[in-house]
Image (cartoon, rainbow, N blue to C red):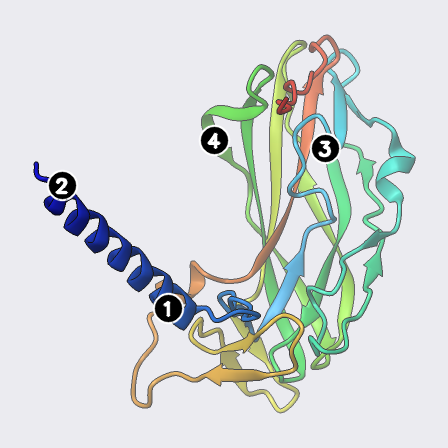
Amino acid sequence: MHSKTWVWVGFAAVLLLVAANLAIFAAFPPGHQHVQEPLKRVNWMMPSGPGFEYRGPYESPVIVYDGTNETWQLQNTTAWSQTLSLGDRYSLDPARPEDIRYTPDIAIESDRISLDFFIRNLAGEDCARADLAVTTETASLNTTTGSPEGDVLPGASTSLPVDDLAAGEWREVRVTADLPQPGPEEILYLTIDLAAPYTITTPNDTPITFDFRRVTVTIPGSNTSWKEGPDPGFTPDPNYNRARLPRGYAVVIVQGADAPPIIPLPTMTAR
């Protein structure tokens, strides 16, 4: 290739680079902060698990089952009755975050576990009556991967009635669930789920159903918000809405008396 050709190729490359840089500066000028996708918070009753729903199995509460005496014992009880902070994720006004705290108070009563969940009425309506749904699932725990495996066995579904929860009010609610019976060396992964009610009844006996499209959009660090209301004349799909009800959950480990200890996976560090 001739030297003049190389010159023109280099010149064209420089022009393309300059054009690309100009396009980037036009989209993101100096000093401009890229705006993250706005957060969406559903205007409804919001349940929260007791603070350990996202922990690994070796950090979750452990309950040991003695098959000989048919008893369950929560390990390190005091550690799971500490006051927890939910931060500002349930604050009514993003510009004035609240530091909401509550205590799970986990207890074993015969063959059942009971613990407190947190709920807050963000529906913008006073709730005279509502029924939250309590469900459980049990699966075997793989101690090598720290993940549940095999068949997931659903437990009994129960309802948790809530009365007189005014708009904006929050409350601790007591949730109870049956405990599984693992084998002597078996380790089970028990999930306790609390789902918001599909319908709440206001003090004047007006039922209001959950509609996933009715949300409040807020930008972190800003007091700007707006609503995305449902289209007029559109009938919401109950199955679509029920599947998207807000929920909170808790995970506990239930193991046999002779089960091996759960060892956390090694942490990878960069050098």
Image spot of residue 208 (x, y percent): 51, 81
CA gap between label 2 and label 4 equals 71 Å
* Residue on which the image places disc 4: 152
Against 265, residue 131 (above or below) is below
Q: Is residue 52 left or right of residue 29?
A: right
- Mark 4 neighbour class, 10 Å CA radius: few under 14, some 14 to 19, many 20 or more: some
* Residue on which the image places disc 2: 3
Query: What is the three-letter code of the residue carrying label 4?
Result: Val
Image spot of residue 6 (x, y percent): 16, 43
Disc 1 or 3, which lies upstream in sequence? Answer: 3
Q: Residue 8 bears which disc, if any?
A: none
Disc 2 or 3, which lies upstream in sequence? Answer: 2
Query: What is the three-letter code of the residue carrying label 3?
Result: Ser
CA gap between label 1 and label 2 equals 71 Å
Disc 1 or 4, which lies upstream in sequence? Answer: 4
* Residue on which the image places disc 1: 238
Image spot of residue 137 (x, y percent): 54, 37
